[in-house]
Amino acid sequence: MTTVETREPFVGRRLRRKEDARLVRGAGWFVPDRKLPGMLHAAILRSPFAHARIERLDVSGALACEGVVAAFTGSDLAGRVGRFQESARKEVTPQLLEAIDGTVKPTPFPVLADEVALWVGAPVAVVVASDRYAAEDALEAIEASYEPLEPVAGPEAALRDGAPVLHPELGDNVAARFRVGSGDVEAAFASAPRTLRRRFAFGRHSANSMETRSVQASYDEGRGELTVWLTNARPHLIRTHVSEMLGLPLESVRVVVPDMGGSFGTGVYSEDALIPFLAMELRRPVRWVEDRQENLAITRHARDQVHDLELAYDDDGRILALRDRFLVDVGAYNAYAITVSYNAAAHLRGQYAIDCFSIEGLNVLTTKAPVSPVRGAGRPEAVFALDRALDLVAADCGLDPADVRRRNMIPAEEIPRPMGMPYRDGAEMVYDSGDFPAQLEQALEAFDYDGWREQQTLWRAQGRRVGIGISSYVEGSGFGPHEGAVVRLDPAGNVRVVTGAKPHGQGLETTLAQICADELGVDVERVTVASGDTGLIQYGIGTFASRSAVTAGSAVGIAARRLREKVLAVAGVLLDADPDELDLAGDEVVVRGEARAVSLAEVAHAAAPGPRNRLPAGMEPGLEAQYYFQPPTVTFASGTHLAAVEVDEETGFVEVLRYLTVDDCGRMLNPMVVEGQIQGGVAHGIGTALYEESLYDEDCQLLSGTYMDYLLPSAVEVPPIEVGHQQCLSELNPFGIKGCGEGGAVSPPAAIANAVADAFRPERVELNRVPIRPEAVLEAVRAARARDQEEGGAR
Amino acid sequence: MRVNGEERRGVAQPRVTLADFLRDELGLTGTHLGCEHGVCGACTILVDGRSARSCLMLAVQAEGHELTTVEGLAPADGPLHPIQEAFSAKHGLQCGFCTPGFLMSVHELLAEVPDPDEAEIRRRLSGNICRCTGYHNIVESVRYAAELLRGAGAAV
């Protein structure tokens, strides 16, 4: 008799990652690791001006350089390569726009600037040569002359009367706007016992994946087929763009994304179509690898928001109404419609019960690099504004910051709770699951909040400036519209999963295998996961918006279930048994409680297409199942963060002493991976809070062009990160999953800013802009003293 | 030059960086380039046992020296080096791009300090940037690697 061990599920275990085996040996495959025969190398000339008319570009000098094969300018490409049409704009439905009183204007962008360059780093010409050294040398031989135009250095300048209109066809510099709200906000403010109004500013930074972008392309002239290898977590989207822009049938373009050295955001870039164009034009493979200076100037810039936030509240610190108007500096092109700004609006109220609200968001065009969604995508900015404001409410009402949160938090019994506005996907926005008060208490207890408050008082008496900050967030995760999976079983019992979600460090090769193994009933060691290749699966969305575990995970699980049913049905025919009495056990199917069994090889043979198949009537041949999961809408993950910092009063330097999080990402597929995501996100957020800024001067010249100027946190700046969990399962997918990729990065700016301000609580020092550089701390302390003197004088 | 214990020869233009030479001429693509200006540490290798940024060295400067890259830590068909083993066991890597540089820095650290404390680990790794892990599990990995290496030493 064959016994089937009842096995502990693989989901939920801290399994070591499958991808590690190759990565720790340096045997991963990143795009620039594999050369193609006869490959050429491209280098790109970029605008040195933020806003300039291109008067003349003469590439003849470059063409005369040794090793140079070709050079192109924007005018050479006119009529041959289309413009990037923002896909995000197409995702915004007319119904949503109507519901949010919204406008989104198109700003398609050219692959090479054709008349006007709109930011420092805008691509204006490309040189192709035998190697990268020769290509970069030849850039210097291009004669370029520009007529500098007036730069537009920020959203307020862009909105001023008489400001240069960067895209004249739009009429003004507002690329998108919308308004959401509910309740009589005017009346609430008019009658509220207390109100406050502050400006909260969130600096611009960039994603800084450790691998820069690269694009490699090869064109098979005989077959008319183009293959593009690139560093982008959305291969199917790139395939669509490339096919449209180069006029190739979709099925003649294959986009392959091998290992990626991080991403932390999404984006389409000129090079994604330019390099394929060059490969087609020159009939030779072409490679372009972004260098770090280019990356810092042009790639995945983000944030850059200014919120004018008002709260109306009572003497007990209960919020009665919220009003916010915010501007997003989207740079030269609005490539992501209202993705980020609407996220900010949707997540602004976070875990708090604020039903009377009015939020207006504007995407404003300036002469800076276009921004894109980066880890958190609008949420860190919103959470920063509201959580800072809550601390000001606490101070005004004489409350502890934890108490003001307790008083305003949505009670667990109100979940699921509609939030009085649509989500970005057009569905009604509903907090579907979660227990925010319990999460706060769990975090406070794990931190020993009361103990630290007592200790803080003692330290304060000793002259030590230690502060504690709290922040919480919600995150709509698992954004649609779909993700698919194909699960295949070979005769030896090995399982292959194919999905359109492309991981860039999240460990999906492991976590998806865990789901598949459980649902199919095989050992996880037998499962491999392939992704990042449009040739493998027809549709795919990709990895961003904390969506892959939710969407691809659900697709894999359901496809695996269907495959299991199929395997058992075929085995049932062979064994003359009811499929319900069968189990998969290693490489055979057994009848439960009996000695009878059939090998998977026999099942595979019986399921193969052909006249001798022994499939149940009506069943498609092949041991394969495919499923596209289409989530009804997002599912809400959440988290609470606590930070303790010490501030050096002399220098303004901030040291993060402690950092603790409690997150709810539903069912954890692999807690080790979840914790890694949270800890990495927190480090990212600490960089945002204290160090990182893509800084422009008043002429929009970039001041942060190298890692000597753009400061990423190292192991010395980031403390150990304590992670706790809640698991409130989602009911919007079959496995209860919620996303966890971004949450870690959402709250640190708010928690740390609150902690720094808290270190100076008696002096009522305010820090309402990130990053908080030492000079900003010193300035804030000076401002508080000046205010106190003024108030003292007035008395 | 000797690379990972083998004599390797190649011709390089004087301006070609050691990193490009390793990757493009010798095919050792485990050494990654993250910034090419000596800050991120992804391209860290060992030159005569000392950590060095291969993006800031010219290939010609390495002539006659002994180099170790990530490919030299463990034989391709053999078990992982204890440091590699520790990074996988403790989830000290996510995307894996910065990992080879970290492994080489840790190799140098543990050769000099077999039992470093947390502050020492963090200080010695401050020349390597990781955007994925938040360093927490990298520190754990280094502690575990130190344990494994000390155990291995005791066994010998």
Image: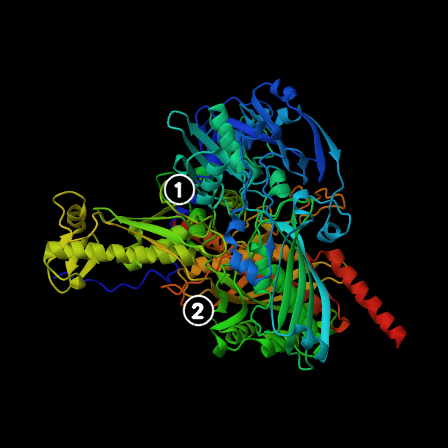
Label 2 or label 1, whichever comes before in sequence order: 1
Q: Mark 2, residues whose alpha carbon is within 10 Å: few (<14), some, or many (≥20)?
A: some
Q: Nearer the viewer, residue A186 or A70?
A: A186
Where is mark 1, residue-wise?
Answer: A534
- In the rendered structure, the residue with mark 2 lies on which chain? A
Which residue occupies the foreground of this view, A301 or B29?
A301
The amino acid marked with disc number 2 is Gln
Q: Is residue A506 left or right of residue A315?
A: left
Residue B61 sits above or below residue A198 on the image: above
Q: In the rendered view, tell whether residue A335 sits above or below residue A383.
A: above
State the residue position of label 2.
Answer: A727
- Point 43% across, 66% down: residue: A666
Where on the picture, by quarter, is residue A368? top right
- Label 1 residue SS: loop
Q: Is residue A404 visible?
A: yes
Of marks 2 and 1, the one in the foreground = 1
Mark 2 in CB contact with mark 1 (< 8 angstroms): no
At which x and y percent is residue A267?
54, 46
Per the rendering, the mark at residue B43 is none
Q: How many marks?
A: 2
